[in-house]
Image (spheres, rainbow, N blue to C red):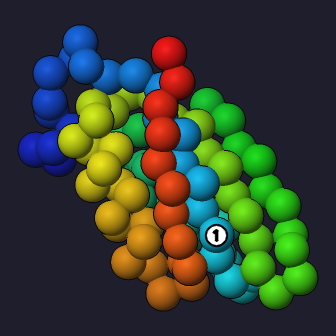
Amino acid sequence: MSDLAKQAEPSRGRHVFLIEMDAAPDALMRALGPFALHDASVTGLELNHRGERMELRVEATGVCPEVAAHLGRKLDALPMVRGVGLGWRA
C-alpha cells in the first residue's frame, strides 16, 4: 500500500473521475491501472465512444481526498488522456 493510500480512514468516500481520452485499443486498461496501484475499489464504470475519443466515468471508494487528487494527476499524465474531472458523492 502506498504512503498516500494509508491516509486516515474516516475521510474516505466515493469519488467520481471523468476521463476524456483517445480511443486507443489499450486505453481502458491503462486508465484503470492507477486505481489498482492505489488500492481504490472501482464500484462503477461507464464508457462512451465519441468518434476518435472515449469518455470514461469511474466511481471508486477506499481512498481519501488526497489520494483521489493524486489519482487525478496520475490519470491526467497518461499520454492518451486529454482531460480529467474529479468529484465525490455522499
For the question of whether residue 25 can be seen, the reply is: no
Residue at 77% across / 48% down in the picture?
A: 46
In the displayed structure image, the side of residue 34 where residue 56 appears, left or right:
right
In the image, residue 21 sits, relative to residue 85, either above or below, namely: below
Q: Position of residue 75 (x, y in %)?
A: 43, 66
For the question of whether residue 21 can be seen, the reply is: yes
Task: Name the foreground residue: 8 vs 87.
Answer: 87
Q: Across the whole image, how many numbered discs are drawn on residues?
A: 1
In the image, residue 20 sits, relative to residue 23, either above or below, namely: above
Residue at 76% across / 79% down in the picture?
A: 53
Residue at 34% across / 66% down in the picture?
A: 74
- Badge 1 local density, few (<14 within 10 Å), some, or many (20+)? many
Task: Name the foreground residue: 65 vs 29.
Answer: 65
User: Amino acid type of disc 1?
Assistant: Glu
Residue at 39% across / 58% down in the picture?
A: 72
In the displayed structure image, the side of residue 9 where residue 46 appears, left or right:
right
In the image, residue 64 sits, relative to residue 86, either above or below, namely: above
Secondary structure of the residue carrying tag 1 is strand
Q: Position of residue 20 (x, y in %)?
A: 64, 69
In the displayed structure image, the side of residue 73 where residue 42 appears, left or right:
right
Q: Which residue is mark 1?
A: 20
Q: Position of residue 47 (x, y in %)?
A: 79, 56
In the image, residue 75 sits, relative to residue 58, either above or below, namely: below
Query: Within the image, what quadrant is residue 40 found in?
Result: top left
Q: Position of residue 1 (x, y in %)?
A: 20, 42
